[in-house]
Image: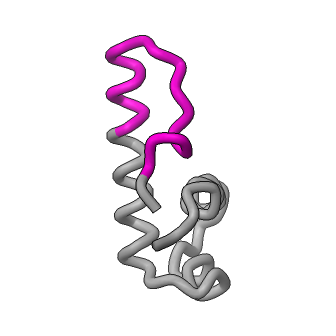
């Protein structure tokens, strides 16, 4: 549904900003979706670190 690059950028911005609700509104998405993407990003990064494989998060996420 959403482009993986868009999702990754939104997660990165959420790490830089203090108001997640405002960020979600600015990008036309629900805040719960942004939290979901953030969690997926964290889980993915943990799995990659455990495997010690340098993979790109954006390449593996479904749209």
Q: Is residue 50 above or below residue 34?
A: above
| Residue at (46, 15) in percent of width and height | 53
On whether residue 25 falls in the magenta region, the answer is no
Measuring from the top left, give residue 45's x and y in whole percent.
42, 33
Measuring from the top left, give residue 22's x and y in whole percent.
60, 83
Q: In this view, does 44 lie above or below 10?
A: above
Color theme of the render: one colour
Task: Write down the region rendered in magenta.
Answer: 44-61
Residue 10 relative to residue 39: left or right: right
Measuring from the top left, give residue 56's x and y in whole percent.
56, 33
Residue 36 relative to residue 61: left or right: left
| Residue at (53, 19) in percent of width and height | 54
Q: Is residue 50 above or below residue 28?
A: above
Q: In which quarter of the image is residue 49?
A: top left
49 or 62, nearer to the observer: 62
25 or 57, nearer to the observer: 57
Please name the predominant secondary structure of the magenta segment in the image. Answer: helix
Figure label count: 0
| Residue at (44, 84) in percent of width and height | 30
Measuring from the top left, give residue 52's x and y in whole percent.
42, 12
On whether residue 56 falls in the magenta region, the answer is yes
| Residue at (55, 80) in percent of width and height | 24
Q: In this view, does 14 lie above or below 25?
A: above
63 or 40, nearer to the observer: 63
Residue 55 relative to residue 6: left or right: left
């Amino acid at each position: 549904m959403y482009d993986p690059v868009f999702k990754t950028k939104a997660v990165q911005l959420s790490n830089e900003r203090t108001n997640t609700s405002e960020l979600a509104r600015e990008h036309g998405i629900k805040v719960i979706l942004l939290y979901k993407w953030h969690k997926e990003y964290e889980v993915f990064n943990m799995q990659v670190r455990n495997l010690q494989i340098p993979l790109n998060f954006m390449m593996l996420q479904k749209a």
